[in-house]
Image: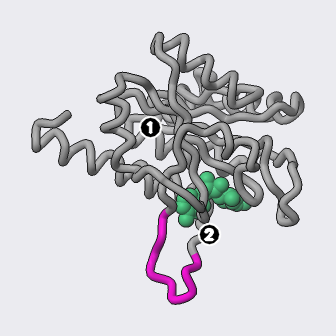
């Protein structure tokens, strides 16, 4: 999806008590989400953490896979990780996108339970095209994005709901990414068929 960037933030997050915390990077999130982004044509996948040792851990994992030898053993893994970018903050990720696209990206955030107005994920690709602006689609960790992030977002993406009787919909971040990207790319295909993209 042209103009779509994806971010996985580790600060500021909420913990179960709703306090502001910084979560640790999970190795699985690096690989799984990189592969989903690669599959659905996301421009770049930002792993966002202000903690230096965490940045060093992620950099080591990325370097390992990006070194020549790894790419021979596992080219598709090498390929998927070669467009992962590490930033210390959400603002840094937005600045990288702005430099790359020469347009200020809009920030669309995700979560399982939103109050208030939301934007359908399918409308994100249309918005990118109509406004001619890139989008940073941001995912959380821990118990979700802290209200500080919610207040500054341009849009809240409508949550993914299933068919659970009790309304349970707390997906893993890896599952939520894959579902949204699949919906976006389906919508893009349908748009192309109708000639509106
Ligand atoms: N430790 C958990 C894990 O491994 O996934 C982290 C949970 S974290 C709160 C889950 C993140 O995935 C949310 O911040 C949100 O970005 C996304 N997410 C989870 N369920 C979702 C839903 N039903 N609709 C939209 N996004 C969802």
Q: Check residue 170 in the rendering and tell me which mark sits there, or answer none.
A: 2
Along the horizontal axis of the image, is 193 left or right of 178?
left
Residue shown at the point (80%, 54%) measured from the top left: 14
Which of pointers 1 and 2 indicates the residue nearer the eye? 2
Residue shown at the point (48%, 70%) measured from the top left: 161
Front position in the image: 151 or 27: 151
Q: Which corner quadrant of the figure contains ligand 1? A: bottom right
Residue shown at the point (75%, 43%) measured from the top left: 148
- Residue reaching furthest left? 194
In the picture, which quadrant includes the C terminus? Answer: top left
Image vertical order of residue 62 relative to residue 194, above or below: above
Magenta: main secondary structure: loop
Element marked by disc 2: loop
Element marked by disc 1: helix
Front position in the image: 136 or 176: 136
Confirm if mark 2 falls within 8 A of ligand 1: yes
Residue shown at the point (68%, 43%) measured from the top left: 151
Q: Position of residue 150 (x, y in %)?
A: 67, 46
Which portion, as a residue range, is magenta? Answer: 160-168
Image vertical order of residue 182 relative to residue 70, above or below: below
In the picture, which quadrant includes the N terminus? Answer: top left
Q: Position of residue 34 (x, y in %)?
A: 54, 40
- Residue reaching furthest bottom? 165
Q: Which residue is mark 1?
A: 38
Q: Position of residue 186 (x, y in %)?
A: 27, 50
Which corner quadrant of the image does residue 173 belong to? bottom right
Is residue 112 in the magenta section? no
Number of marks: 2
């Amino acid at each position: 999806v042209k103009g779509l960037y994806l971010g996985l933030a580790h600060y500021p997050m909420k913990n179960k008590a709703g306090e502001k915390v910084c979560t640790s990077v999970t190795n699985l999130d690096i690989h799984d989400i990189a592969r989903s982004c690669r599959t659905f044509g996301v421009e770049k996948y930002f792993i966002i953490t202000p903690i230096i040792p965490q940045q060093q851990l992620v950099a080591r994992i990325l370097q390992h896979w990006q070194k020549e030898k790894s790419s021979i053993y596992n080219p598709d893994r090498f390929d998927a990780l070669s467009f992962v970018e590490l930033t210390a903050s959400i603002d840094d990720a937005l600045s990288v996108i702005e430099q790359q696209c020469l347009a200020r990206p809009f920030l669309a955030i995700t979560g399982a339970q939103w109050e208030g107005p939301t934007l359908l994920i399918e409308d994100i690709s249309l918005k990118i095209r109509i406004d001619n602006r890139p989008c940073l689609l941001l995912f959380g960790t821990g118990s979700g994005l802290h209200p500080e992030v919610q207040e500054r977002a341009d849009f809240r993406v409508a949550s993914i709901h299933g068919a659970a009787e009790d309304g349970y919909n707390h997906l893993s971040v890896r599952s939520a990414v894959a579902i949204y990207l699949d919906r976006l790319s389906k919508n893009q295909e349908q748009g192309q068929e109708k000639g509106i993209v």
